[in-house]
Amino acid sequence: MRGERANRRIVESHKLCFPMMSIAANGRYVGLVWDRHDHPAAVFDSPDRVFHSGSHLMGLWFPGVGERRLENETAAFRAYPLEANVPMTLTATLIGGRGETVSPAVEQYVKLSGGLPPVPEFEGGFEAAVELLAHGWLDSALHEDGIWRHAVWGSSFPARPAADAPGYMLWLAEHTGDEALAQRLRAGAERGLERLTPAGNRDAGCSHVARPFAPLLFGRIEPYAERRLAAALQTLAAFDEQGLIRYQPQTGKPDYGSTHWEDHANGLSAARLEPVLEAAVFTGDDPLTKAALAVLDKQLEVYRNTVPRGAQTWEMPLHTPDILASGRILACCNLAYQLTADQKYLDAGRDWAWTGVSLVYLDRPTDGPVGLYATTAVLGATNWTAPFWIGLPVQWCGLVYRSSLQDLARLDPDMGDFWAQLAVGITRSGLQQTFPLEDRERQGLLPDFFHLRAQRSDGPAISPGTVQANLPEAFGKTPIYALQRLAPSDVLLHVPGDIGRVEHRGRDVRVEIDGWYSKPYWVRLVRVPAPAPRVELQGGKVLTTEYSDKRQTLNVLVQGQGTLVLSQGPQEDKEVEPREP
């Protein structure tokens, strides 16, 4: 940052996501952990420019920032009275250990705290969340006769057709107990589908989190896949020989790379690679997969043990630490692990997941009900000066990271519960920050940012889909979309719902699927070397199948839930009991 706010040696307590400070160097870290309720002034300077010791400064001073101390003032301006015979105490813990970054210190803080804090409660629970988001899609200023704006903010973000909005609305219709609201949601979704382009474009979306569930609900899967493949191949050409995207200043805008020591950053590169890997898992295209993985391998090597940064260069300097970068790189690692089952991608994903933890409020920053699991977007300021984002949560950035965490939770056998709780907490905080029903224009929409002290939502009001993408997991409901590798095979399965146990019995593959849609929907399998002579859904119905020899993909139109059986052999004579939905 530039100007007075570049001095951040002693800051207000609510600007810290949790009470821990650490320095890492030469394969070691050292740090301090304390209790925020003791109200010390946390002092940090690396290198030490306060005492000019030639080293680094970490300290806890009294009084804290507030009535007796201004931010960044080494001297208090008002005396702190001590009563006779009443001790004043502060308990702090000195931590240290091995680590190439400060992430091990963050992990140590979580362990010392007894794990993650309880996830926030949303008043009214799941039913209230469904109602709130439904009115966001239907009744807020976001919606204009079957087309939707990305956000409500003056004349910005004009309304456009969107394929994700009807899908999200249908999920809400399936889960509300209010039949009148369900009918309105279905009618709104139908109108939204009518407003899509004549070709039935399933690419358009109005949310920050993109999931390929729209073609699985509404069809035209192969045209969607071909468009994604073509776009991915075009994007690959933008990466240089090192697998990086080089920052190029835009005409008429500041040079956001001027304060970075390199012309690239992990968030900038990963943001371009993520949709390429998404196309690889949806199309199964082998040349695309190999090329995308080669680029990711180069990026993981270049950016190993670095700070997540540079994912928002439309307004933020390239050097700025950024939780969105953590989410983007983690998403790339998740997708690579699905494609390959290579442990190195799971390990890298865990490392990048930890880089985002430091930007999540794991300790209540104020006395207000909203704060836990709110997320700091960036450690910096737009255009180096304002808005100043430290201490001003931007939940949409955290929710993108959340979706990557939720995917990691399905893949990580050792820490899945931890990542899932972190993801649920971020989702619940997003609901808490969402504009209430009483705000007619912005009801059900996510605020761009949230004032912790005032407990007030503010800024552009964003599409409900950013919260809703992983709303089901926050309340133990069927996910909106799931992807899974049918190990030990290379086949990838896409379902608008959940995927359960996978069994390989001789020449049969049996997969439990739990689709949430009461009408017919598609499941998609990629990297299927030959069409299965028999495909059935035990407990439901298979209506039709479409196999592509060219792409080695199998699309299956089903209705209901149960066990999907793909058999290369004759049908068994014995009946199989259907699984309960």
Image (spheres, rainbow, N blue to C red):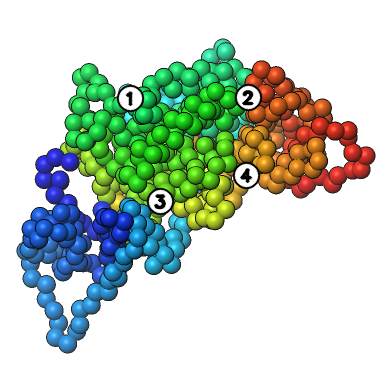
Q: Classify 10 Å Cα crowding around label 2: few (below 14), some (14-19), many (20 and above).
A: some
Helix, strand or loop at label 3? It is helix
Separation of residues labelled 4 and 3 (CA atoms)? 27 Å
Write down the residue under mark 3: 354
- Image x and y of residue 295, in percent: 43, 30
Residue 459: name its quadrant.
top left
Residue at 57% x, 18% y is 226
Camera-side mark, 1 or 3: 3
Quarter of the rendering occupied by the C terminus = top right
Write down the residue under mark 2: 218
Residue at 22% x, 18% y is 251
Write down the residue under mark 4: 478
View extreme (top): residue: 198
Camera-side mark, 1 or 2: 2
Please report whichever mark, 1 or 3, sits nearer to the chain's N-terminal start: 1
Q: Nearer the viewer, residue 507 or 174?
A: 507
Separation of residues labelled 3 and 2 (CA atoms)? 37 Å
Write down the residue under mark 1: 156
Q: Mark 2 belongs to which amino acid?
A: Phe
Residue 322: name its quadrant.
top left
Please report whichever mark, 3 or 2, sits nearer to the chain's N-terminal start: 2
Residue 244: name its quadrant.
top left
In the image, residue 299 above or below residue 162: below
Please report whichever mark, 4 or 3, sits nearer to the chain's N-terminal start: 3
Q: Mark 4 belongs to which amino acid?
A: Thr
